[in-house]
Amino acid sequence: MQNTVPTMDRHEFFRLAATSVGVMLLAPAHAGCAKSDAGDPATDAGQTLDFLVNLNANDNENLSTKGGYVIVNNVLVAQTNDGLFVAVSSKCTYQGGTALVFKPKENQFYCPLDLSRFDIKGRVVSGPATVGLKQYVVTDMANGTLRVQA
């Protein structure tokens, strides 16, 4: 009795191998570009966040002026043009999460990599981002301290 091993044509093998490699390379790009209908701020039900920001600490001196901001615990805390303190997730929701900056003239969060813009509530103003930022509650403790909570 003779053992027969199924064989594959060389051209068929290379076609399948190239297709597989292409799928592996393009899958992350496709996932990063996936369209989401949710333009409102993202929520993470499992995330608990609660911390204090001392406005008198040297690390937080930017918050003493309107338009200033700091990033603490992956949260961007900013003082708006109106003197209100706001906090949102510090990373852009588009392709990998570039650190955002606060643009005081526009009262918007801005991604320097893909140019996405978000309003002070974390909603997408312009893309390519389609998913909003997580917004946090900021409470002014009236003793030079802000409390940031999810």
Image: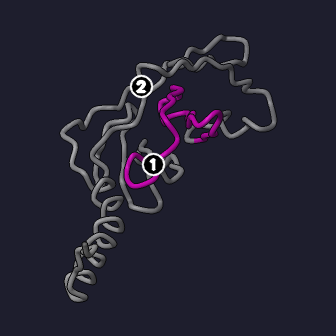
**Position in image of residue 79 (x %, y %):** 55, 33
Q: Which of marks 1 and 2 is nearer the N terminus?
A: 2
Evaluate whether residue 5 shows in this view: no
Q: Under tag 1, what secondary structure?
A: loop
User: Residue visible at 65% across and 35% down?
Assistant: 72
User: Residue visible at 53% across and 28% down?
Assistant: 83
User: Residue visible at 36% across and 54% down?
Assistant: 116
Give the answer, above or below, for where 54 lies relative to 128.
Answer: above
The residue indicated by pointer 2 is: 44
Q: Which of 31 and 106 is in front in this view?
A: 31
Give the answer, above or below, for where 106 lies relative to 146.
Answer: below
Q: Under tag 2, what secondary structure?
A: loop
Q: Is residue 4 magenta?
A: no
Coloring scheme used: one colour
User: Residue visible at 28% across and 66% down?
Assistant: 23
Q: Distance between the residues labelled 1 and 2?
A: 30 Å
**Position in image of residue 96 (x %, y %):** 45, 53
- Span of residues in magenta: 68-96
Numbered mark located on residue 105 in the image: 1
Q: How many labels does the image show?
A: 2
Residue type at numbered disc 1: Lys
Q: Is residue 79 shown left or right of residue 64?
A: left
Residue type at numbered disc 2: Asp
Q: Does the magenta stretch include residue 80?
A: yes
Q: Which of marks 1 and 2 is in front?
A: 2
Give the answer, above or below, for where 31 lies relative to 141.
Answer: below
Q: Which of 87 and 105 is in front in this view?
A: 87
How many residues crowd mark 1 within 10 Å: few (<14), some (14–19), many (20+)?
Answer: few
**Position in image of residue 115 (x %, y %):** 38, 59
Say which quarter of the image contains residue 18: bottom left
